[in-house]
Image: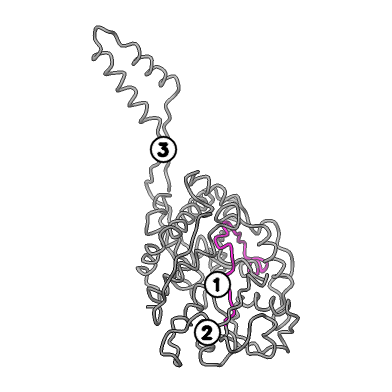
Amino acid sequence: MRTRTITRATAALAALSLVAAACGGDDDDDGAAEPAEEAAESTAEESAETTSCETPDAVSLQLQWFTQAQFAGYYAADAEGLYAEQCLDVTIVEGGVEIVPQTQLANGDVDFAISWVSKALASREAGADIVNIAQVFGRSGTLQVSFADAGITSPADFAGKKIGNWGFGNEYELFAALGQAGLDPASDVELVGQQFDMVALLDGSIDAAEAMTYNEYAQVLETMNPDTGELYQPEDFNVINYTDEGVGMLQDAIWADAGKLASDDAYRDIAVRFVAASLEGWAYCRDNVQACTDIVLDAGPQLGASHQLWQMNEVNKLIWPATGDAVGRMNQSDWDQTVELSLNTPNLEGSTVLTAEPDEGAFTTDIVDEALALLGDDFDGTGSGFSPIEVTLNEGGN
């Protein structure tokens, strides 16, 4: 449990110290001044607010995928002692293909979870009592990647092509793009289930592959082009960015237990401190790209050093500059677009992510506002001066 000790000196005591210092006798300057100085020093010490942490609060965070720089801010907050400064002992729980973070949260298996907004809203509609307390990623990182000679430069060019997607709720930006282009996903394209890699694109099994800016797109650029004996280059591919197409949906956010947040003051206090330290971790990664990459590498990711550096750089682009008033604050127009697409974009079976508008409790800005206040005015929560770095990928991401 966190214990906070605050001691403040009264104005009267401070004033008394000043009077004592001012009224020292001329005949015995040293004797009169010494106790006055001691009183002033004591007052200064008592005026400072001190925080003690007897026993850190144990907290668990469920990631939505395996260890990688997509989650670097949380690993950095742990490694750099930012969670400890907020009197938290955080366990980061690795995700995987079969793990649904928001379900882990709703079941009480973890305290907080990272999930895409559309997926979490679907779980919420199905009965999961969860709430978005910090929208960390302000931009979608979803792409559709094809070889340049396939001539696929817009979603309209998907017609008659084999288009890969991962499913598991990752496909709705693709379906929204198809609908926007006037294509029927059931008849105008051949949709192909894709593994979470780029093998099917590289071996010609599909014409365009789903990819994240920070992960799978890097995988093709880490692969040797058999025709040149060199790594593939960006000009070898056409890339459709779903944000640019106007169908980007909000992705990584911090979700909390809504019931506990409303009824348990201790959990609410932990949530504020957890968000504060997490945002501080992301700011650290913004300003220390290589150091943050090294932290992730120490955590044991599956892919190597140049891949993680690329990923760190690309993830920073999804966060900074902040799309809201500050990092973690919801941009209402982005929320509205995500909800609208979730309500009105049918998948291959005709189902939509949501069947009804989410209620006002689906997200809250209260926690992130308190977290930002806790960090104070010296914390740069906007990242307005952010500039990405240049990253050179190595074969295999090593």
Name the amino acid, label 1.
Val
Q: Nearer the viewer, mark 2 or mark 3?
A: 2
2 and 3 marks in contact (CB < 8 Å): no
2 and 1 marks in contact (CB < 8 Å): no
In the picture, measured across the screen, residue 196 lies left or right of residue 331, that is left
Quadrant location of the C terminus in the rendered image: bottom left
203 in magenta: no
Residue 92 lies, in percent from the top left, at 43, 64
Distance between the alpha carbons at the discs numbered 1 and 3: 40 Å
In the picture, measured across the screen, residue 306 lies left or right of residue 379, that is left
* SS for callout 1: loop
Find the residue positioned furthest to the top. Answer: 27
Q: Which residues are magenta?
A: 122-145
Residue 195 lies, in percent from the top left, at 53, 84
In the picture, measured across the screen, residue 28 lies left or right of residue 194, that is left
- Residue 281 drawn above or below residue 309: above
Name the amino acid, label 3.
Thr
1 and 3 marks in contact (CB < 8 Å): no
Distance between the alpha carbons at the discs numbered 2 and 3: 61 Å
Look at mark 2 in the image and give the residue it sits on: 236
- Residue 25 drawn above or below residue 355: above
**Splitting the image into 4 quarters, where does residue 329 fall?**
bottom right
Q: Nearer the viewer, residue 88 or 152?
A: 152
Q: Earlier in the sequence, mark 2 or mark 1?
A: 1
Q: Earlier in the sequence, mark 2 or mark 3?
A: 3
Name the amino acid, label 2.
Asp
Residue 5, numbered label: 3
Q: Earlier in the sequence, mark 1 or mark 3?
A: 3
Q: Nearer the viewer, residue 376 or 384?
A: 384
Look at mark 1 in the image and give the residue it sits on: 100
